[in-house]
Amino acid sequence: MGRNLCSTSTTTAARQRVRRGLWSPDEDEKLFSYITRNGVGCWSSVPKLAGLQRCGKSCRLRWINYLRPDLKRGSFSQKEEELIVSLHELLGNRWAQIAAQMPGRTDNEIKNFWNSCLKKKLISQGIDPSTHKPAASEIQSKKRAQETSGSVKNGGEVSTGDEAKFPVDESRYYESKPLFGASSLPATTQFEIFGVGYGSNVINPFPHVTRPGFDSRPPSQFSAYAAGLLNSERGGVRETHFSDMSGSRSTSNISHSYGVTQSIGQAAAASFSWAEGGKKLETLFQLPDFIKSQDQDPSPWAQNSSDDFNSYPALSLSEDLSGLDFEVFQET
DNA sequence: AACCAACGCAACCGCCCGAAA
DNA sequence: ATTTCGGGCGGTTGCGTTGGT
């Protein structure tokens, strides 16, 4: 079986050829610029074409987990937490599949969140995070409690714990109810969900950074733009390139800013910002005016700021979206 | 102020799979 | 049918940050 040099080669020469470790702002710019211009294609050729001394795999990960403009970022909401738990119960550690149901979130992000927070939270609630059933110790203590109270069910047997009382929302863990409806929404509606889903948290999750021309806009504009970037291979955006490398520097967070010119001749701006300490790069966008807002009427998601994910056909969402043409771009 | 442990997260590793040669 | 290659995925590592002492 073939092996990717990046991931498997252990020769010193091979390792010396590619850079490793944290990405520099310059590398991020190069990768972002390249992908924005050319779209996602053959990752193995990206480093060479983009002028990077990284392996293609590293470029791919950097794009998917960090540079992609449609990433939500920011902390997970309560509803997102619940959705992750529900999906994990269904899918197990299939993070990519879970991420596919959560636009704007990456598998890596969800995986990290699960391992660092949700797992512990479930354990603290007496739930075994791998089975989503009460932990053995919890069953034992419950059994003891029932025995002492004299209200033991089923002759004192505690088989699966399904009937045990538990200090969590039982319906979540013990009912085998379907998580998502089987209905499918019209494509336009799904696009709105997609847009708002991406955009809801995109509105400057980093309040210390000012994004002129962006923060005042409806989120779906950003979303539509982001979707177009990702969809460029399919013709959503035929050609997008950086045209103005006249960066501006400030003393604080904004280190670079660039113009992004669409093939139709209207400009958006993207800028890279490094958070305090220079450790984290944020990709920021100033959106082109030509992108029409698709959610003047709030979408279901927008209306439900409480994000009732269970109301939507999330299991089929990603597939449905893949077939969309993102007409918002073609309107221009 | 200095030290240390815990935590969070970006990045890497290694394996698997499907497509192409 | 077999080999090679590229991409995707889940698991793991390591570093920077944060909070407590």
Image (tube, coloured by chain):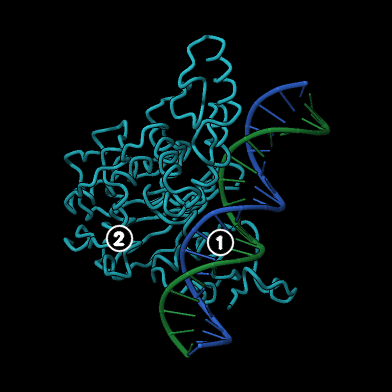
Chain colours: A cyan, B green, C blue
Q: Is residue A254 visible?
A: no
> Residue, x 49% and y 16% (percent of image)?
A152
* Residue at (30% x, 65% y) in the render: A262
Q: Position of residue A166 (x, y in %)?
A: 48, 22
Residue A329 in the image, given as x and y percentages of width and height:
22, 61
Image depth: mark 2 or mark 1 in front: 2
**Subunit under mark 2:** A
Q: Quadrant of the N terminus of chain A?
A: bottom right
Q: Position of residue A47 (x, y in %)?
A: 54, 72
Amino acid at pointer 1: Asp
Q: Are marks 2 and 1 on the same chain?
A: yes
Residue at position x 44%, y 53% in the image: A271
**Residue A152 appears in view:** yes
Q: A236 or A99, which is in the foreground? A: A99
> Looking at the rendering, in which quadrant would you find the C terminus of chain A?
bottom left
Q: Which residue is mark 2?
A: A228
